[in-house]
Amino acid sequence: MNELYTDYGHVSLNHVGETLCGDNVSVRKLSEDSYVIVLADGLGSGVKANILSTLTSIMMSKMVGSDIDIEQCVRTIIATLPVCKDRGVAYSTFSLISVKDNRWITIYNYDNPSPFIVHEGKAFLPDYTVSEIHGKRIEKAEYEATVGDSFFMMSDGVINAGAGEILNYGWTLPQIMNFAEETITDQLCAKVLATTLIDRCNALYEGKPTDDVTVACIRIRERQQLSLMVGPSTAPEDDDRMVSLFLSKKGKHIVSGGTTASIVARYLNREIKAVPNEMETDIPPISTIEGIDLVTEGMVTLNRVLEYGRDFAAGNQDYFNWNYKTDGASRLASLLFEDSSDIIIFSGCAVNPAHQHNKDLSISLKMKLIDELCKILRTLDKTVKVSYF
């Protein structure tokens, strides 16, 4: 397996008063290591803009995904897009980033703010060549990426943030690039970087965006594996085999559930030590076992992780309410959604005697919880494998 992967994420704000966003991001996975990501910005806002941007982004990504030459795709879309008679501009603008083999980057941009790159903490515009296709100005750049490189695309709602209110002329591209430099760290994933920029935009709009706002981020990262063990096996004699397989995997090891922790501690012949919560929280405290990266309580913690996951996969609006916390749910959510690319879940199917009379904690609910968690992780393009015992 390739030791690198393409991490991507995007977040949007709707024009105040609109239920639909006039921007759209379409992601097409061409292979394990190659992607096409298109950010389209429909003219105006609301339903019409949403339809135009959605059609543009999906058409572009599907054409490229059908092995049509990218430049030919750009030419086709440019020729197809109508022009507004009143404003003299296209009904949808777009930015496109193609990633091949987690290394070779091609950028096309039509009338959106120019996509930029952050390399080793420094933001810069790539060397764009400018051409005209059907009389329209197209920026193109090619770039060889290395680990840690980040690429940002945005709709013009980003550079319009704060215009005439907090900032005289909006949030300029140099200011946005400087903000990205100050924000970015090796640990942050693409979705969180996009969320951070969007949060800043929302503050500049004072919570009432007068334009649709979208940021899409792409990062080239090293793969990180995580193994999560939840619950004892159906047959007690299989517990040791389950733990042995769990511990044989590389990367981080997480144990969820008191009974599960006891089984792992017994296998390792080590103590379980309780860790009091550092701040007020309704999540049960974590524990420690030497050699295990995180030990949490079971169902209550996993249910909260699932709540965070649903939000993270959508608009990520709740991120700043939990990312700074140190309780088991917050730490596990960060490890699953932000840090890891490959996740192996060891799910024991034994019924906990303490839960037999509580339908909310039944084994069927536990399986449904794990199933939904896996679906969310796959939505985030994580590689997920589940082994049942």
Image (cartoon, grey):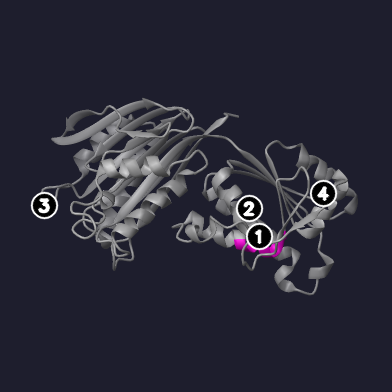
Residue 28: x %, y % from top left = 43, 41
Question: Mark 1 and mark 4: span between their CA atoms?
Answer: 18 Å
Q: Check residue 247 for magenta coloring.
A: no
Q: Which residue is mark 3?
A: 87
Residues in magenta, as a range? 297-304
- Distance (Cα) linking label 1 and label 3: 51 Å
Mark 4 surroundings: few (<14), some (14-19) or many (≥20) residues within 10 A: many
Please say if the residues under marks 2 and 1 sit with CB atoms less than 8 Å apart: yes
Q: Quick one: 337 or 133, which is closer to the camera?
A: 337
| 292 left or right, relative to 72 | right
Disc 2 vs disc 1: which is toward the camera? 2
Reading the chain from its start, which is encountered first: label 3 or label 4? 3
- Which residue has dot 4 on it? 264
Q: Determine the image quadrant of residue 104.
A: top left
**Whole-number angstrom distance, CA of label 3 to CA of label 2:** 49 Å
Against 212, residue 360 (above or below) is below
Instruction: State the residue at coordinates (74%, 67%).
Output: 362
Give the vertical position of 179 relative to 20 (above or below): above
Main secondary-structure element of the magenta-colored stretch: helix
Residue 302 numbered mark, or none: 1
Residue 82 image position (x, y, % from top left): 17, 47
Q: Residue at x 35, y 46 (%)?
A: 58
Q: Which amino acid is tagged 2?
A: Leu
Q: Is there CB contact under 8 Å for labels 1 and 4?
A: no
